[in-house]
Amino acid sequence: MDTIEDQAVTFAGIQEAGEIVARELGTTPLVEHPLLDRLVGSADGGVLVKHEHVLPTGSFKVRGGVYLAARLTDRERTAGVVTCSTGNHAQSVAYAARLAGCHATVVMPSSASQVKRDAVAALGATVVIHGDGLGEAAAHARSLASGAGRPTGPSYVDTTDPRIVLGHATAYLELFRQAPGLDAVFVPVGSGTGAVGACLVRDVLAPSCRVIGVQSAAAPAVWRSWRSGTVETAPSATRASGLATSSGYPATLPVLCAGLQDFVLVSDDAIDAAARLLASHAHTLAEGAGAAALAGLLATEGRAGGPRGRVAVMCTGGNASADEIARLAAG
């Protein structure tokens, strides 16, 4: 493959990605847990958990890596790729490079947990620690990529690269085929790539289903952008690394604005409480971003216009750090 220009983020593209991803990854479970349902389920419907944390890297983002590997350009296979991430996107790109037999360099901020640094390195990528936050790490990663004076250097793979987004969307291709009668699905939002996939697949397979985004109140940049319709920035102080974005994303914002029926903010403490519920009521150890969807559902219970009927929550990742696990146990 020579270019990525034909990788339009459309339902047809998601279907193509689904065929490729299905050959590498198994379908993840969609489970109704009786204890959780008793606590959270409404009188006219139950709660289903989509267990994306069981995938090889412990996160739905490996789907993007699998499709990226299949769609790398010839130059990328030769020169390699570079990206930045606090962890799960990093692992997905490292996984892609290993599948494709090329090299990946991953820039991670100093705030990235040691377990995620180690996981990226174990997949064969070179880990570079730079900056205190994702913005500084991203700037350094782009400086390492091909550009002025580096025509043969590695290519920068952003989290909103269309190949990544198409891979992420395959989770929702599975979801709506597993449960065609869903009334609502709650999706955690970092850059918004998962929510974009949810909206695009929903529009074709389940047009009456509500897609509801969830973000940490301690990192509300994308929520603010959705509210205003323009890209906005906001400080990020969340403990949930998968939600730690400080700016809206031009590539995902238009779809989020058009497709999300609601977008809720939840506190980090509420996310921790949801993670404890997943552990005690659904046999699931989730990282902060992976528990955010359930926190969003709990935050909307009883609210006017809140979701009723059959509801799904996306448990997007299980890469909880030792500090997270200790905090959950102490609580």
Image: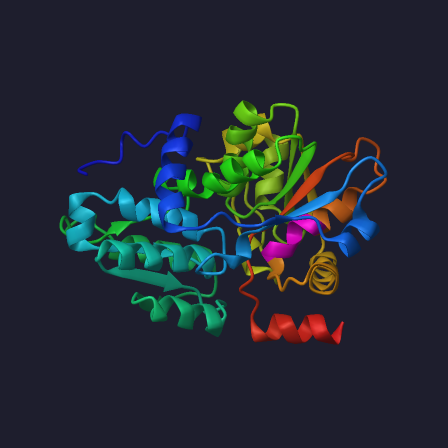
Name the dominant secondary structure of the magenta segment: helix
The residue nearer to you, when weighing 330 against 156, is 330
Quarter of the figure that contains the C terminus: bottom right
Spot occupied by residue 117 in the image (x, y as percentages of width and height): 42, 70
Please identify the quarter of the rendering in which residue 244 is found: bottom right
Which residues, given as a range, are shown in magenta? 289-294
Spot occupied by residue 185 in the image (x, y as percentages of width and height): 65, 38
Quarter of the figure that contains the N terminus: top left
Spot occupied by residue 258 in the image (x, y as percentages of width and height): 57, 25
Residue 129 in view in this figure = no
Q: Is residue 319 left or right of residue 296?
A: left
Residue 97 in view in this figure = yes
Q: Is residue 40 left or right of residue 100?
A: right
The residue nearer to you, when weighing 243 against 313, is 313
Look at the picture and state if 203 lies above or below 52.
above
Q: Is residue 260 left or right of residue 307?
A: left
Q: Residue at x 28, y 44 (%)?
A: 70
Look at the picture and state if 193 lies above or below 54.
above
